[in-house]
Amino acid sequence: MPSGYSGFAALGPEALGLGCWPLGGGAYWGTLEQVTATRIVRRALDGGIRYFDTAESYNDGASEQALGQALGSDRHRAIIGTKVSPENAQNPGVRAACESSLRRLGTDYIDLYMLHWPLPLSPDPASRHLVEDIWATFLALQDEGKIRAIGLSNHGPQQMRQVQALSVPIISQELPYSLLSRAIECEILPICQQQHYRVIAYSPLQQGLLTGKYASFDAIPPQRARSRHFHWSRGQGQSRHHGSGVEEALEQALETLQTLANDLRISLSQLALAWVRANSAIDLTIVGVRTVEQLEDHLAASAALCPPSIQAQMNAATQGVFDALGCNPDYHEDAVRSRIR
């Protein structure tokens, strides 16, 4: 691991983190009372989870606020990662965004501060200067102790090179990764390993699709059916892509995985989560929950549940989805409009 915040050294192999997007409630995940959020966070701490992942954009800041309230005097036990959106990094600026996140979290430092999505790639001198100024502010905030480490999120090879050219001490990269979203295996994951970035995998359960909770694709809420896995029409006007999806391959993969989980006498979510955690290239896997019961299920998903022989079966079961979706890691945009380059 490159030099940077030593708190990550406390996170052992196959570490599990809590994805805090549902905290604070909101239109995407629905209402979640603070008392429930606090119970989830407390159980996570007691269960050995140390990393808590949020963002300024999650529920318009309510996620950060709910997490801060839930941690309370136990803030020192947690490693908090939060993110600034690229539009806020430019206007009103990284410093203002960071100060707002600090206030909502009720803390005087952020352990890992990430750029949520890449800045535009442009040869225009004005654009280059803006990018340089934004990353210079990250470094200044780190020097001041307001952030302890700097990370990327959703950055592709070109975008990583852009940051590397500025000598920013990046320690991590947060990326989408699940049995049904394996595009980072093509190029991004090897680069992260070469650069010694800690890889944080998000959406390992494909927003509930890998939990077995949906009897059919028709039962999936439109906002969670916007990805390229599905026909664009399932998003009911919310899809960014215009593709026909890979629903036949998806259905076959899910059936095979569910059968395998049944044979192993574990839940599909435990199997899917164990598969991600068994990948030595993944340092930290974050899961979002809305109940303590869901969290308990995830805490039981050890990588030991997925030995190499089972991994091979799961890889084969999902290869059709992988091949059909290709190596574009932006699962909401067509390749030509991908935000991850």
Image (cartoon, helix red, strand yellow):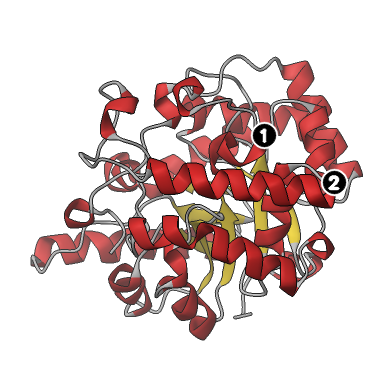
Residue 108 seen in the current view: no
Residue under the image location 43 percent in, 41 percent down: 97
Q: Kindly identify which numbered label has been placed on residue 106.
A: 1
Task: Name the residue rendered at 32%, 42% in the picture.
Answer: 245
Which quadrant, please, contains the C terminus?
Answer: bottom left
The tag on residue 27 is: none
- Which x, y percent locates residue 174? 52, 58
Q: Amino acid at mark 1?
A: Gly
Say above or below: 285 vs 62. below
Q: Which residue is mark 2?
A: 265
Nearest to N terminus: mark 1 or mark 2: 1
* Amino acid type of the residue that numbered disc 2 sits on in the rendered structure: Arg
Residue 54 located left or right of residue 330 = right
Identify the secondary structure beneath mark 2.
loop
Q: CA distance from mark 1 to mark 2?
A: 42 Å
Q: Is residue 77 left or right of residue 315?
A: right
For mark 1, give the secondary structure. loop
10 Å crowding of disc 1: few (<14), some (14-19), many (20+):
some
Of discs 1 and 2, which sits in the foreground? 2
Picture quadrant of residue 134: bottom left
